[in-house]
Amino acid sequence: MGLRALLDGQVFPNPAHGEEGLSSSRSERIEDPSRTARTTEIKPDGTRRPITREWVPEAPVALEFNGLAYAVMMATPADLEDFALGFALTEGLAKSPADLTDLAVAEVEKGWIVRARLTGLGIEQLTERVRARVAESSCGLCGIENLDAVARPLPPVAAHGSLEEAAIFAALAALRGHQPLGRATGAAHAAAFASPGGAILHAREDVGRHNAMDKLIGALASARQDPAEGFILSTARCSYEIVEKAVRAGATRLVTVSLPTSLAAERAVAAGLSLWSLARDDSVLLVNDGSDDR
């Protein structure tokens, strides 16, 4: 029986550890023969040669909270525990890691499913959120209520000091060493947390830029690492969602390798988030200095 049946509540493996159908998603790499394929490399001069390439894993991942199917995300099925926790925190479903319990990850016929028990949140409120998500379009924004949600002010970030640009360049130089999936496929996003000196302490990868951020935020929460004690480095395009996830996670500084959208820059300024973008080996653009040292 496939993923749709699971979402309809017809079947789900027993969440007890060791039960058939459950498996861990924690791994540096996902070993799957279907990830590799023979293809042809073509040069500008017309030269052709057969090569073997590795594809980045992508699969539907269903998130279920309190027995309700909340969302199906296309994601790389690794570190799904971190993903579920980070997603719950950035969606506002959980206020702290302690609100998410009984976490179970299962691989099913057509994808993966993660379910957990949320406490500290009324079942009626969760039901309303599920009902609203069912009505959303594929873009994730639909109707006046969702427009209001986008315009809702972010909480102000905590007071913080400046960040030496040398730390950004140090983290950029070290990032590739924390991207095994990216090195193998050239098609995975990464989100990393670095110390104030630029040492990368945590990193997560995913085919989706939002998912990589959620995984990192979940990993930081599990490790009880305060995001305000360093900075987040993301390979993603700096959309407003990336800024919002960083702020809601408690980060004070964000560095992205691409330029921000206008809304992302506005949200960063309004929240007081220090934001650097277009981060390269030889330069970085300071978009907003939200530090107390201005």
Image (tube, grey):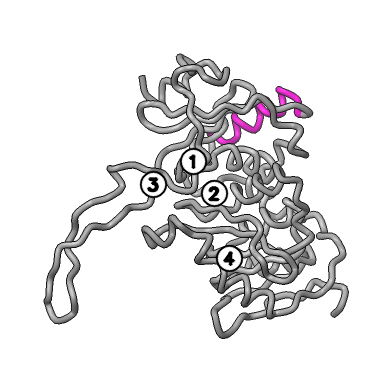
Is 31 on the left-hand or right-hand side of 209? left
Give the spatial CA distance, label 1 vs label 3: 13 Å
Relative vertical location of residue 5 with respect to residue 161 in this rendering, above or below: above
In primary-sequence order, the first of circles 2 and 4 is 2
For label 1, the residue is 73
- Tag 3–tag 2 contact (CB < 8 Å): no
Is 180 on the left-hand or right-hand side of 241? left
Q: Residues within 10 Å of mark 3 (few under 14, many from 20)?
A: many
In primary-sequence order, the first of circles 1 and 4 is 1
Residue 133 colored in magenta in the image: yes
Identify the magenta region: 121-134
| Residue at x-position 55% and y-position 71% | 257
Give the spatial CA distance, label 1 vs label 2: 8 Å
Residue 195 appears in which quarter of the rendering?
bottom right
Q: Which numbered mark, 3 or 4, is in the foreground of this view?
A: 3
Q: Regarding mark 2 in the picture, which secondary structure is present there?
A: helix
Give the spatial CA distance, label 3 vs label 4: 23 Å
Residue 173 percent across, percent down from the top left: 56, 74
Magenta segment main secondary structure: helix
For label 4, the residue is 238
Type of the residue with mark 1: Met
Q: Regarding mark 3 in the picture, which secondary structure is present there?
A: loop
- Tag 1–tag 2 contact (CB < 8 Å): yes
> Which circle marks residue 57 in the picture?
3
Type of the residue with mark 2: Asn
Q: Residues within 10 Å of mark 2 (few under 14, many from 20)?
A: many
Q: Which numbered mark, 3 or 2, is in the foreground of this view?
A: 3
